Amino acid sequence: MVSIASLTNAFVLFLSCFLAISLLVSGRPATFLEDFRVTWSESHIRQIDGGRAIQLVLDQNSGCGFASKSKYLFGRVSMKIKLIPGDSAGTVTAFYMNSDTDTVRDELDFEFLGNRTGQPYTVQTNIYAHGKGDREQRVNLWFDPAADFHTYTIMWNHHHIVFYVDEVPIRVYKNNEARNIPYPKMQPMGVYSTLWEADDWATRGGLEKIDWSKAPFLAYYKDFDIEGCPVPGPANCATNAGNWWEGTAYQALNAMEARRYKWVRMNHVIYDYCTDKSRYPVTPPECMAGI
């Protein structure tokens, strides 16, 4: 028969292990001020619903931006975003991770490019690894992202980086360091978002200019979720193979994700640097790595 003392000791041991793991990994849906700070134009970021959601404002006076209070090394970051409705040409709403280093920069970008009313919204992704970027891909979204909130996620582990729109992977960047392809894994990155005017390039290569008579332009964010290894933090967190995002289920796309990814690539990709022979006469090696 198991004694009460033995059960008590076992429970205490379990609780201690659970708390130790919890301290290693940051992660929960948070209010804005728990995990983020305003970096640019505080008057243009408005908290809603007790800080559980925010509104970003772009007008002729200013855009705005915010950033996480901590940096993270590997993990998953997601936000629900409702983009600018109507005529948003010339605007860019961005959600990205950045090492904030001057020379050897690592960065993972979602950039939502505004459109003329009735045209599809385009999302541009880009990846900087060891200071090298220029890896743009563009996807026309298959829904109206201004009609409701949708979840945008960056998954980053030792095996690959995946950009998701809701549950659909739209881009995969494999870790192929064995083939001398750079992969971000040494520098922690902060989580950032900005809303700004970029009508010199954002919509149809700069042909469509922003219509300030439609201002203010408003984007909404909620359900901020960061699950990763905070830096500074426990030194062994980022190398811990027990982190859930390093598990077998997250080391490659599953069968359903692979089908969805193929569907996006076949039907919604409108630009891929990998196939742009005017920029890259020789196909970049990471483009041949597959998923």
Image: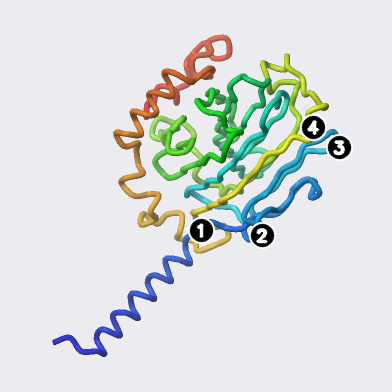
Amino acid bearing label 4: Ala
Q: Is residue 68 left or right of residue 27?
A: right
Give the structural element (helix, strand or loop) at label 4: loop
Task: Name the image quarter holding residue 174.
Answer: top left
Q: Nearer the viewer, residue 112 or 156?
A: 112
User: Which residue, given by chain and number where applicable, does mark 3 sit on?
Assistant: 61
Q: Is tag 4's residue or tag 3's residue first in the polypeptide sequence?
A: 3
Callout 3: 10 Å neighbours few (<14), some, many (20+)?
few
The span from disc 2 to disc 3 (Cα, nearest Å) is 26 Å
User: Which numbered disc, 4 or 1, marks the residue that appears first in the sequence?
Assistant: 1
Find numbered disc 2 in the image and state the secondary structure of the residue it sits on: helix
**Label 4, label 2: how far apart the Cα atoms are:** 25 Å
The x and y percentages for residue 277 are: 53, 10
Q: What secondary structure is marked by label 3?
A: loop
Q: Position of residue 62 (x, y in %)?
A: 82, 38
Disc 1 from disc 3: Cα separation: 34 Å
Using the image as rendered, state which of residue 151 and residue 202 is in the foreground: 151
